[in-house]
Amino acid sequence: MRLVGSMVTALSLVLGCSGEHGGHGSVPSEPLATPSDVGLVPAVIDTPLWTGPIAPDAVANESKEAGVVQVTLEAAPSDVEIVAGQTVRLWTYNGLLPGPRIEARVGDLIRVHFKNSLPEATTIHWHGLRVPAEMDGVPVAQTPIEPGGEFTYEFKAEDAGTFWYHPHVRSDEQVERGLYGSIVVRDDAEPETNSETTIVLDDVLLGEDWQLATFSERHAMVGRQGNVILVNGHATPEATLAPGGLHRMRFVNAANARYYRLSLGEDFWVLGFDGAKLERPVRVSETLLVPGARVDVVFAGQRDGERLAWRTLSYERGHETGSTADAKLFDVTFAGETRETASLPDTFAELPVLAEPTATKLLALEESAAAAGPHAGHGGGGDAAPVFSINGKVFPDFQPLRAVLGTTEEWKVSNTTEMDHPFHLHGFRFEVTDVDGAAPPFRALQDTVNIGAMQTVTLRVPLEGHPGTWMFHCHILEHAERGMMGQVDVEP
Ligand code: C2O
Ligand code: CU
C-alpha cells in the first residue's frame, strides 16, 4: 500500500502524541478512563491515513415493487480495516462499518429482514423514525432477538430527513462495537447540489493491540470516549468533490459519548436537524452535534485544486472534556470538472404551528455518586460507579408517564448535573421553545437535543404518531444503560 512509508509518522500523530501514554507510533498501553484520552487525537493530521471512498454505497434495494424498500441486515462479528493495515475486531451489520445506508422516499414501506449472528441478544432501533411501537426495537416492546434468531421489521418512512439505526440492548457495548448505520429519507423538496454525502461519525477506544479496550465502569462518568475518531468507519479519510456549486453533507453522531463541534473554517448552511428541514437554511460558522443527533448541511464548492477540512473544535461538556485539542475529521479536496448548481432556496416549507400544550411534564436528569445499585456492576469494574436517574428513578424502576395520542404537551427537562446530557425521545418530534429563559433563534423539529449542565430546556411535544410505550433517555449510552432513561405510555 502506498501509504506504508508515511504510516508510522501518521499513526504516531493520531495516537502517540501524549508523552505519558505509550511510545512513538503506539496507542496507550492503558486505555484512559478520564477525558484526557481525547487528547490522543491531535489537532492536525497532515497525512491522510486512508484515501478510500468516504462513504459506503447505499444498500441495494431487494424489492422490485414500487414504494417498497427491502433490505437484509445481519449482525455479526467482523474484522474491519479502520486504517491501512490495521484491522479491529468489531460487530457490524453485513460486515460493513457503518452498516449499509438505507435510502427511501417519504411514504415508502421499509422492510428489514434481520438476522442476529452475534454471541448475544440484540434488537434494532430506528432512531428518529416514527414507527409503530412494536417495531421500535426496545425491550419493552420486543423480546430481544437471541443469537441465531431472525426478525422482520416493517414500517413506513413518514418524514424526510436523516436517521440511523442501532441496537437498544446493552447499547453502550453494542454500539461501541460498531453496530450502527444511516437511513436517508427524501421528499420532493430536496435542494439541488453537486454532491450529497452521508457522514457517520464515531470513535473507538483502542488498546495497544489495536483492539477495543475492555469495557469498564471507569468510562461511565463522561461516557466512553474513544482515542480514534472514525468517519464512515475510517480514520481521516478524504472526500474528493467536483469544484464549484453546492455540496450537501448529512452528519450522524453514532459515538457513545463524543460531542462533535463541527467547523469547516468558513461559513456553511444548516438545512435541518434530525428528521426535518428548517423553515429556511441558516448560515452558521459551526454547529454542535451531540450523540444521537444529526445535522444536514450545505457548503460552497471551492476551485479546482483547493481543499477544505471538517474539524471538531474543543467543547466543554463537563469534567474537563473541553481540555482537548481541536481535531481534524477529514479533508475535502476539490478536483475535476467544475459544476455549478442553483443557489439554495430562501425558504423551505413552514413548520406547522404547534397547538398549546394541555399537559406539562417535568423531567429532572440526575447523577449520584457511588451508590451501588443493581445496575452499577454492568460491564464489570469497581463499586464507585456513578448512578444516573430521571426524577429520582433509575431505569427500569421508572414508573411510566402517561399521555394521550393527538394531544400536545410541554416537557421541561432540567439537567441537575455538572455535565451536558443529550436528551432523546422515541416515537415523536419536538420543538425547543425555551432554553433557560431564552427563545431559540429559529424553529426546528428535533428528536435529540443537548441539555447543558444545570440547564432547563422546554420542549413542545406534539404526540402525533403511534400509540404505545416510548422511551426517552440520555444518548450518552453509558448514562442511558445506567438508568438515565424513562418511558411514557401514549394511549390511543
Ligand atoms: Cu438512538 Cu433510544 O436511541
Ligand atoms: Cu447523560
Image: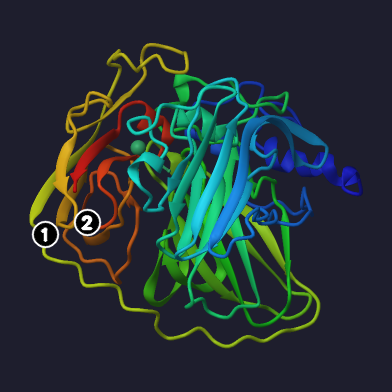
Q: Determine contact: label 2, label 1, CB under 8 Å.
A: yes
Residue 378 appears left or right of 334: left
| Identity, as a three-letter code, of the amino acid under mark 2 | Val
In this view of the protein, can residue 283 be seen by the observer? yes
Residue indicated by mark 1? 357
Query: Image quadrant of ligand 2?
Result: top left
Residue 54 appears left or right of 369: right
In this view of the protein, can residue 291 be seen by the observer? no
Residue at 48% of width from left, 33% of height from top?
123
- Residue 41: percent from the left, percent from the top? 62, 42
| Identity, as a three-letter code, of the amino acid under mark 1 | Pro
Q: Earlier in the sequence, mark 2 or mark 1?
A: 1
Residue at 32% of width from left, 66% of height from top?
444
Q: Residues within 10 Å of mark 2 (few under 14, many from 20)?
A: many
- Residue 355: percent from the left, percent from the top? 15, 66
486 over 201 or under it: above or below: above
> Ligand 1 within 8 A of label 2's CB?
no
Q: Secondary structure at mark 2?
A: strand
Residue 420, by quadrant, is top left
Q: Which mark is residue 461?
A: 2
Q: Secondary structure at mark 1?
A: loop
409 over 390 or under it: above or below: below
Q: Nearer the viewer, residue 345 or 114?
A: 114
Q: What's the coloring here?
A: rainbow
